[in-house]
Image (spheres, rainbow, N blue to C red):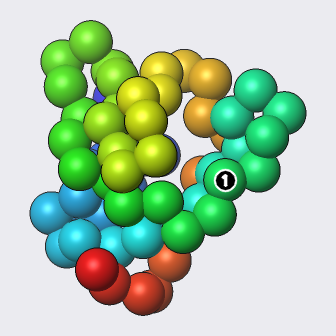
Amino acid sequence: MNIEFRFLQKAIIDKNYISFNYENKSLKKIKPLKLNIDNKLYSDKGIFEFERIRNLQILKDKF
């Protein structure tokens, strides 16, 4: 398990917004809702594969 995965799990528990790049698109202020066993991130903006997420940032803002 890599460090980004652990940070993402912690962001879901703490209800922090996240920002990341996904398939050459920059997504900002996303609400992460759930991360399942298949490494799929469920959010308010859609479903994302964790392997394709780049430059993950955990924001201080909470929802």
> Is residue 14 something one can see in this rendering?
yes
Give 56 or 6, whichever is nearer the viewer.
Answer: 56
Q: Does 34 sit above or below residue 50?
A: below
Q: Which residue is mark 1?
A: 27
Q: Quadrant of the C terminus?
A: bottom left
What is the x, y in percent for residue 3?
43, 46
Q: Residue at x 23, y 50 (%)?
A: 33
Q: Residue at x 23, y 58 (%)?
A: 12
Q: Does 27 sit above or below residue 40?
A: below
Taking the image as shown, residue 34 lies to the left or right of residue 42, namely: left
Name the residue furthest bottom: 61
Give 10 or 61, whichever is nearer the viewer.
Answer: 61
What is the x, y in percent for residue 28?
63, 63
Q: Quadrant of the N terminus?
A: top left
> Is residue 55 something one can see in this rendering?
no
What is the x, y in percent for residue 8?
36, 51
Q: Residue at x 35, y 45 (%)?
A: 43
What is the x, y in percent for residue 17?
42, 70
Taking the image as shown, residue 10 lies to the left or right of residue 53, namely: left
Q: Residue at x 34, y 23 (%)?
A: 40
Which amino acid is tagged 1? Leu
Q: Residues within 10 Å of mark 1 (few under 14, many from 20)?
A: few
Picture quarter containing residue 22?
Answer: top right
Q: In what element is the residue under mark 1? A: strand
